[in-house]
Amino acid sequence: MKATARAHTNIALIKYWGKRDRSLILPMNNSLSLTLDGFYTETTVEFHDYLTADVFYLNNDCITGKAYQRVTSFLDRVREKAGRTDVYAEVHSVNHVPTAAGLASSASGFSALAAAASKAIGMQLNNQELSVLTRQGSGSACRSVYGGFVEWEKGLKEDGSDSHAIPIVPANHWDIRVAAAVMSSDAKKILSREGMERTVNTSSFYPSWVESIPADLITIKKGIMHKDFEKVGSIAEANCLRMHATTLAAHPPFTYWQSTTFLIMEAVRDLRSSGVPAYFTIDAGPNVKVLYLPEDEETVQHKLRSIAGVRDVIVSKPGQGISYV
Ligand code: PMV
């Protein structure tokens, strides 16, 4: 009863922002992401008859507290689904996602955990079923089941059985780059969970965010199919700005941006005015990810590294979905 899985993290180009069901993690809107090859989590799960509770090691440290609770509650769902509420697991996870890059390790983490745990306990889930299960650990993680460009369909059912990712095109369809600009910052975080809830409940801009999604999705998917970089980049950037606008209209208002965030956004606009197609996107934090084409590698790296407050630039290509090791 042992399995090891590897999952990569993903970056949303059309953001998931807001839940309609907290416990099942059902989103208000569809979202669309690119799985990234540079950042992944590898997780081994082994169920033992003799254990009386789960144990969780992350990068060889034994984890307790909230992070442990999230893992063990997720394993409860796996046990229930498998009809094996009598067994507990030893979980070993190794994260290859530099936390400083501001990429969600929860996406690769829960995706690898769901794959390894479901296999170890003897379930043979297809990717769609695995995505439904993964979603219940962390929403954005359900997209990491697949490689390349991926859409998460919000679904319509109350039980969440139709809320899962679907692959659009595989990683080898299009060679683009995503650079994560790493900044020196230890500002207090508003977790995505809290941020979403506050905007859904109080932001006067929230309804127009939800209304804007279908049109963005149609345009960006056309752009992806035709490898129209300007179309994909400009939709992703505008979608990100609209998501962040909802936080400014929340009560109390808040923003994830810091001064360096603005400097990077300006640098990306500068690149564009000098003829280099580059676009930014930002998740629930101050870090900025920049989309560009391989031929502009040097120019983009140089520009980003020259910004005061940027400590490092980590580049990724499109990556693969779940694999078993
Ligand atoms: O799945 P969570 O709770 O980490 O939320 C992710 C939210 C965003 O990163 C802001 C957007 C997204 O679609 O990944």
Image: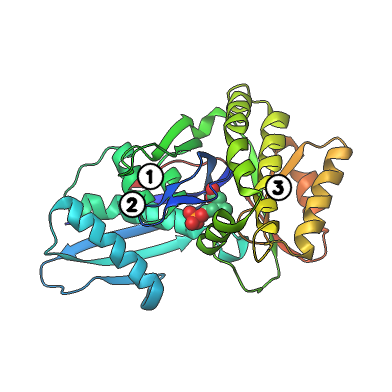
Tell me which numbered mark, 2 or 3, is placed earlier along the sequence: 2
The residue mark sitting in front, 3 or 1, is 3
Q: Which mark is residue 5?
A: 2
Q: Quadrant of the N terminus?
A: bottom left
Q: Amino acid at mark 1?
A: Ile
Q: Amino acid at mark 2?
A: Ala
**Alpha carbon of mark 2 to alpha carbon of mark 1: how far?**
7 Å
Mark 3 neighbour density, 10 Å: few (under 14) some (14–19) many (20 or more): some
Residue linked to disc 1 = 322
Q: Are marks 2 and 3 in contact (CB under 8 Å)?
A: no
Residue 29 percent across, percent down from the top left? 51, 41
Could you tell me which residue is drawn at 82 percent across and 65 percent down?
Answer: 308
SS class, disc 3: helix
**Alpha carbon of mark 2 to alpha carbon of mark 3: how far?**
34 Å
SS class, disc 1: loop
Q: Answer above or below: position of 90 versus 304.
A: below
Q: Amino acid at mark 3?
A: Leu
Mark 1 neighbour density, 10 Å: few (under 14) some (14–19) many (20 or more): many
Residue 185 percent across, percent down from the top left? 69, 71
Could you tell me which residue is drawn at 38 percent across and 36 percent down?
Answer: 156
Could you tell me which residue is drawn at 73 percent across and 42 percent down?
Answer: 279
Residue linked to disc 3 = 241
Q: Are marks 2 and 1 in contact (CB under 8 Å)?
A: yes
